[in-house]
Image (cartoon, rainbow, N blue to C red):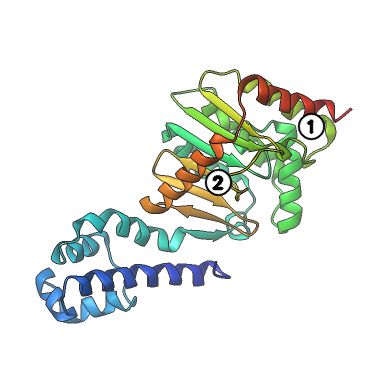
Amino acid sequence: MSSSPLSSAQAARAAVATRLQSIMKDAGLTGNELAARCGWHKSKSSRIARGKTPPSDADIRAWCTACNADDQVADLIAASRNAESMYVEWRQIHRDGMRRIHEQTVPLYQRTRTFRVYASNVVPGMLQTAEYATGLLRSITHFQGTPDDVSDAVQARLNRSRVVREGDHRFALLLEEAVLYYRVSDDAALAGQLGYLLSVMAQPNVSLGVIPLGARRAAWPLEAFYAFDDAQVAVETLTAEINLTAPGEIRTYLKAFGELSKIAVRGPEARACITRAIDSLG
């Protein structure tokens, strides 16, 4: 992963340019011949192939059509659109505090019908209680050194989480068992959070699986990620959020979700995991 959003975006643009070059070569065309087929000035294909000019969606469609590679259009358009927004540092996202990003993502949550979430570090945001979220967001604010709007951000997070109880949305969530024990809030808040998990998992639109600590793993622990239908995957790292929209990458994360699902327990066994975590709080 590149060290900055700019260098990452440049690398993503270069990757798109390289793929377009390969398509052109596989078709046996020169840059001038491709430009002629597309009705472009001869320099345009060269600028796109060298990554000097980002291609528009129309450019990609024309390029692929000229090379008889229409089956690659969707993946390339998604990769091109993702080049600028795929890697954004949390400090940039939270430069004005955290309330704004919660409000901005409400439309994404509202239009998503199926959420698939894998949590390896904290309880997923849409299932967080106010007290748990307060402890977590306060820690994040302190660590990042970004403006403190924790109270407003918590309320915005709760407002966004209404999708769990309202509308036509389904949630498939996987939690590593260790998440149930991590003290990202005080013990009272954690106990309340775990109690809420027991309550919400009874909803017919929520499937909550817990991956036991001692499970024999075919899939190793991964970074936390959120899949929104089959359209987008948001991956959370320490420094940045990575938003993936390329169909191939989305399929890879959904495959990982499927493998992780196989080792998760649900129903009474999941409840037992959560209850043990509550009991450990004394």
Between residues 5 and 250, which one lies in front from this camera angle? 250
As drawn, the label of residue 260 is none
Percent x, y of residue 166: 50, 22
Horizontal side of residue 242 vs 265, given as left or right: left
Could you tell me which quadrant the N terminus lies in?
Answer: bottom right
Percent x, y of residue 149: 69, 46
Reading the image, the residue beneath label 1 is 189
| Residue 165 against residue 70 in the figure, above or below | above
Q: Amino acid at mark 2?
A: Phe
Callout 1: few (<14), some (14-19), or many (20+) C-alpha neighbours within 10 Å? Answer: some
Between residues 96 and 53, which one lies in front from this camera angle? 53
Instruction: Name the residue located 72 percent from the left edge and 52 percent from the top edge.
Output: 141
| Residue 78 against residue 185 in the figure, above or below | below
Horizontal side of residue 11 vs 262, given as left or right: left
Task: Work out whether mark 1 precedes mark 2 in sequence or the reverse, and give the earlier one.
Answer: 1
Cα–Cα gap, marks 1 and 2: 24 Å
Reading the image, the residue beneath label 2 is 225
As drawn, the residue found furthest toward the front would be: 216
Percent x, y of residue 160: 55, 34
Horizontal side of residue 55 vs 279, given as left or right: left
| Residue 271 against residue 137 in the figure, above or below | above
Q: Secondary structure at mark 2?
A: strand
